[in-house]
Image: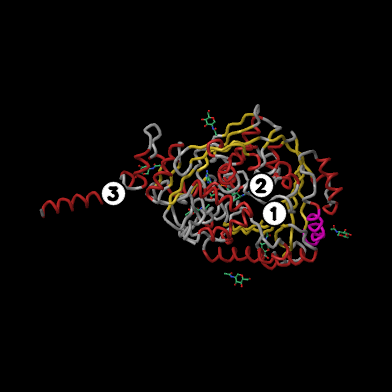
């Protein structure tokens, strides 16, 4: 008996050793489960990166778009699965459920809180960048877009086939379709055509049971939820079908800069009186920042950059602005004309003449540490208010303030049409932002604090029930621990992002993912079961 016992002991020890040396080959691990499940025609092991694989760090870092989460103490995934085939996603869900391992889904990695590639509990990343085909049909005026594509690639692929078709979406070319389309998708054509979600007509999704669903088989409630409610609470989206929109063959842009000394208060005051009331063809983005005062050595001043976009020509743009917003002092020489695709390049501040292929670049040109917050402005800010905000910004030095115009078609869409509720009654969306270069927690605390200070300072000027935009993810609004209190915790951020649509999202979530497998710091919770409140 003793010898048998020893033999068993030895056998188990060797087994344990081999398990710890080759986790990928053991069926009792998550990776082993992935390998066992994978179909021979779509081998999965070449898509699995363990920390011991030499490319692990570079794969992890290639889609980190916020350097705040590129620190040595940032929690790292147990493995990264760079899905090569849809069956890999099925396996990922089924094996992660079985092994109780948390999954983070990453498409373009632009999440402002890093929630697509960071978690405080053990986790792995399902990375979608290999699944990025885009099929455009000009005849049907539609396209199927896989989630790993970037919006730059979407722009490029449409323009390759037509110069009079476009799509209303964000303008930063590296932003991923997966996160961006599922959370809204706001860009320069929003006042004419709404958000990306207002132009999505179908989707393909893998649900918690590993089933492939399209709009017809998932039903209208779930389709509604993954077009604005953030798909990461509901499943893994594979692709979206989008409806293309018509654009003129030439569009016009202007850029105007003004400093505080150039009547900036009056100009911004006038802007807020009219910017949401202009025709849908026109879009004015205003960026306000703090710069060195060129007239007073060592002093700071406020600068505003007004960027205008017009679905029409320079003459039309010039006369419209001079009629409705003469305070800007626009000159015809401030305006330039471009094809629609060139206008996207220009809007991103690339020099005139930059080839449109720049939109295909997957390497972000200027990575920094970032913090973002958002608000909605419902009443114009009085002149005294603007002056005091500018003074506060000079005192804080770093935070940016951006105004993105609403109105136009945005006002015509019902707030319950999609989970995204911020429609009529908004003048602008406000983005608060801080960018910095220094690593470390001290720098992060300092700059995040500045952003919060400016946000707090704005309290009297924005609506009492402050709203927020899901795609500008902000953990200050509340965190979910996904335990007993998850519904109550979810209400804190859920109401800000979704207002009256929150409970409908919870209803869908409770039906399609009752065990709350698809969860993160700000996911949609399930309704509390009776007795657990
Ligand atoms: C430089 C920069 C510019 C930006 N510009 C704009 C802009 O012009 N307009 C605008 O509206 N927003 C803008 N944003 C915000 C952007 O829309 C969001 O960060 C968006 O979520 C990014 O999508 P992603 O796929 O790149 O991000 P990811 O970090 O990959 O994902 C974001 C979230 O979506 C989830 N997710 C991703 N893919 C899937 C999937 N396939 N299935 C289910 N869940 C998924 C993730 O788990 C995560 O919760 C910008 C952000 C940055 C950093
Ligand atoms: C990572 O290493 C394991 C062996 O430890 C190997 O099976 C796997 O294919 C490697 N992954 C990649 C993407 O090369
Ligand atoms: C991210 O961190 C790694 C490891 O410290 C570093 O090598 C890399 O340069 C960082 N990325 C960027 C863009 O700074
Ligand atoms: C695009 O078409 C190719 C070839 O038919 C197909 O393999 C791919 O899955 C399609 N992509 C989408 C997003 O439908
Ligand atoms: C500022 O406004 C005043 C009065 O409205 C005007 O006289 C002056 O020319 C303006 N200055 C600039 C730089 O626009
Ligand atoms: C602004 O001025 C400071 C010194 O007061 C200098 O260090 C900094 O480089 C200047 N910034 C720019 C953009 O010129
Ligand atoms: C954050 O800002 C507040 C208010 O200005 C200040 O009192 C506090 O010291 C700051 N904290 C940090 C960590 O910078």
- Check disc 3 and report the residue beneath it: 19
Check contact, mark 1 vs mark 3: CB within 8 A: no
> Residue 522 lies in what quarter of the image?
bottom right
Q: Looking at this view, is 308 or 457 the one in front?
A: 457
Quarter of the rendered structure image containing ligand 5? bottom right
Q: Main secondary structure of the magenta part?
A: helix
Q: Where 476 falls versus 29 (above or below)?
A: below
Q: Secondary structure at mark 2?
A: loop
Residue 200 image position (x, y, % from top left): 62, 39
Mark drawn on residue 429: 1
Which secondary structure lies at badge 1?
strand
Real-space CA distance between mark 2 and mark 3, rounded to the nearest whole angstrom: 48 Å
Is label 1 within 8 A of ligand 1 (CB to nearest ligand atom)? Answer: no
Left or right of 178? Residue 428 is right
360 magenta-colored:
no
| Image point (43%, 37%), residue name | 87
Query: Who is closer to the viewer here, 240 or 264?
Result: 240
Q: Which residues are magenta?
A: 259-273
Q: Earlier in the sequence, mark 1 or mark 3?
A: 3
Circles 2 and 3, Cβ within 8 Å, touching? The answer is no
Marker count (numbered): 3
- CB atoms of marks 1 and 2 within 8 Å: yes
Q: Nearer the viewer, mark 1 or mark 3?
A: 1
Tell me the tag on residue 186.
2
Separation of residues labelled 1 and 3 (CA atoms): 53 Å
The residue carrying mark 2 has its beta carbon less than 8 Å from ligand 1 = yes
Q: Position of residue 147 (x, y in %)?
A: 54, 40
In the rendered image, the residue lying farthest to the front is 530
Q: Using the rendered image of the protein, determine whether residue 105 is visible from the camera's viewpoint.
A: yes
Q: Nearer the viewer, residue 214 or 31?
A: 214
Q: Position of residue 74 (x, y in %)?
A: 47, 58
Q: Secondary structure at mark 3?
A: helix
């Amino acid at each position: 008996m003793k010898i048998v016992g020893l033999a068993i002991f030895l056998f188990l020890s060797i087994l344990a050793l081999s398990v710890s040396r080759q986790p990928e080959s053991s069926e009792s691990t998550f990776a082993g489960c992935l390998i066992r499940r994978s179909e021979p025609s779509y081998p999965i092991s070449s898509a699995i990166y363990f920390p011991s694989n030499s490319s692990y760090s570079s794969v992890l870092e290639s889609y980190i778009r916020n350097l705040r989460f590129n620190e040595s103490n940032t929690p790292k995934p147990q493995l990264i699965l760079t899905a090569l085939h849809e069956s890999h996603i099925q396996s990922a869900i089924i094996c992660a459920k079985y092994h109780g391992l948390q999954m983070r889904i990453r498409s373009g990695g632009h999440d402002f809180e890093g929630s697509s590639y960071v978690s405080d509990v053990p986790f792995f990343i399902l990375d979608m960048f290999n699944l990025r085909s885009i099929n455009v049909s000009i005849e049907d005026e539609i396209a199927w877009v896989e989630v790993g594509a970037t919006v730059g690639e979407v722009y490029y692929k449409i323009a390759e086939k037509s110069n009079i078709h476009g799509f209303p979406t964000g303008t930063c070319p590296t932003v991923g379709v997966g996160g961006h389309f599922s959370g809204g998708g706001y860009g320069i054509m929003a006042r004419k055509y709404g958000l990306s979600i207002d132009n999505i007509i179908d989707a393909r999704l893998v649900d918690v049971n590993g089933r492939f669903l399209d709009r017809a088989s998932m039903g209208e409630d779930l389709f509604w939820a993954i077009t604005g409610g953030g798909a990461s609470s509901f499943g893994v989206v594979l692709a979206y079908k989008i409806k293309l929109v018509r654009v003129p063959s030439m569009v016009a842009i202007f850029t105007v800069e003004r400093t505080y000394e150039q009547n900036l208060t009056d100009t911004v005051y006038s802007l807020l009186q009219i910017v949401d009331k202009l025709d849908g063809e026109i879009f004015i983005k205003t960026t306000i920042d703090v710069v060195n005062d060129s007239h007073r050595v060592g002093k700071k001043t406020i600068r505003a950059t007004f960027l205008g976009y017009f679905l029409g020509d320079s003459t039309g743009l010039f006369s419209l602005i001079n009629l409705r917003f003469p305070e800007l002092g626009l000159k015809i020489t401030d305006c330039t004309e471009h094809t629609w695709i060139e206008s996207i390049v220009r809007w991103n501040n690339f020099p005139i003449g930059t080839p449109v292929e720049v939109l295909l670049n997957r390497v972000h040109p200027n990575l920094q540490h970032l913090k973002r917050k958002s608000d909605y402005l419902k009443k114009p800010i009085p002149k005294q208010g603007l002056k005091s905000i500018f003074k506060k910004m000079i005192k804080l030095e770093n935070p940016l303030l951006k105004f993105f115009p609403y109105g136009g078609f945005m006002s015509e869409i019902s707030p319950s049409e999609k989970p995204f509720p911020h429609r009529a009654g908004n003048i602008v969306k406000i983005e608060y932002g801080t960018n910095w270069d220094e690593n470390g927690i001290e720098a992060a605390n300092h700059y995040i604090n500045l952003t919060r200070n400016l946000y707090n300072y704005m309290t009297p000027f924005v609506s009492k029930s402050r709203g927020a935009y899901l795609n500008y993810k902000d953990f200050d609004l509340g965190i979910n621990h996904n335990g007993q209190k998850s519904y109550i915790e979810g209400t804190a951020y859920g109401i800000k992002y979704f207002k009256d649509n929150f409970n409908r999202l919870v209803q869908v979530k409770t039906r399609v993912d009752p065990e709350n497998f698809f969860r993160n710091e700000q996911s949609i919770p399930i309704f509390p079961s009776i007795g657990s409140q």
